[in-house]
Image (tube, helix red, strand yellow):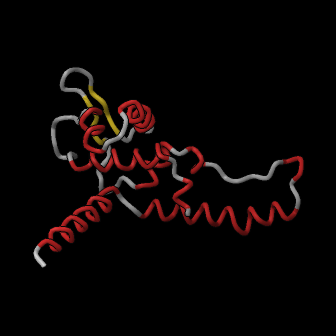
């Protein structure tokens, strides 16, 4: 599956950003510890993820006892692609043949298969906003609740 292309760090980044998005309207920042506990993701791992998200200007951080992270972009405009491209450097790379042994077949595979596949993945990720992820989560929760009353 194409999701194999997304590392654990990328998946954690999407989950953490989605969690932050739930608190988007809140004045107070969310701590790494609370995200770590809520999502069962190692704090050390999250710190690495957040340093990448901060470098990409997708989150802002504040220090001190009340410190933590906040989304810097609205969940309605922030896409899965924005988040993953900040974390997954492989998403940004185009496949290129190794110069020494690049045969016409290598070039044909790149042109006919790999580049169109990469473009399709990028396009799909650009269509999904963080708000979409949260609406899907809500839909799944309401489906669960419905089940209990049957």
Q: Where is residue 16 in the image (x, y as percent from the top left)?
A: 33, 44
* The quarter of the displayed image where residue 143 is located: bottom left
Q: Where is residue 26 in the image (x, y as percent from the top left)?
A: 16, 42
Residue at the spot x=17%, y=35% of the render? 28
Q: In this view, which residue lies farthest toward the bottom? A: 150
Decide: is 41 above or below 95.
above
Of 12 and 60, the residue lying toward us = 12
Q: Position of residue 150 (x, y in %)?
A: 13, 79
Residue at the spot x=17%, y=46% of the render? 25
Left or right, 15 with respect to 34, comes to right
Left or right, 140 with respect to 79, comes to left
Q: Where is residue 9 in the image (x, y as percent from the top left)?
A: 46, 43
Of 81 and 144, the residue lying toward us = 144
Q: Where does the N terminus fall, quadrant-wise? A: bottom right
Q: In this view, which residue lies farthest toward the left? A: 149
Decide: is 9 above or below 32.
below
Left or right, 5 with respect to 96, comes to left
């Amino acid at each position: 599956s194409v999701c194999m292309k997304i590392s654990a760090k990328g998946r954690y980044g999407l989950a953490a950003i989605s969690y932050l998005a739930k608190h988007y309207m809140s004045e107070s920042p969310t701590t790494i510890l609370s995200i770590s506990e809520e999502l069962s993701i190692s704090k050390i791992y999250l710190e690495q993820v957040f340093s990448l998200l901060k470098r990409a200007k997708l989150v802002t951080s504040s220090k001190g006892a009340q410190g933590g992270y906040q989304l810097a972009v609205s969940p309605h405009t922030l896409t899965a692609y924005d988040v993953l491209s900040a974390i997954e450097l492989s998403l940004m790379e185009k496949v290129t043949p190794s110069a020494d042994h690049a045969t016409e077949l290598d070039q044909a595979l790149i042109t006919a298969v790999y580049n169109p596949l990469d473009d399709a993945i990028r396009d799909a990720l650009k269509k999904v906003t963080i708000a979409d992820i949260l609406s899907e989560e809500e839909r799944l929760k309401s489906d669960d609740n419905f089940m209990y009353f049957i």
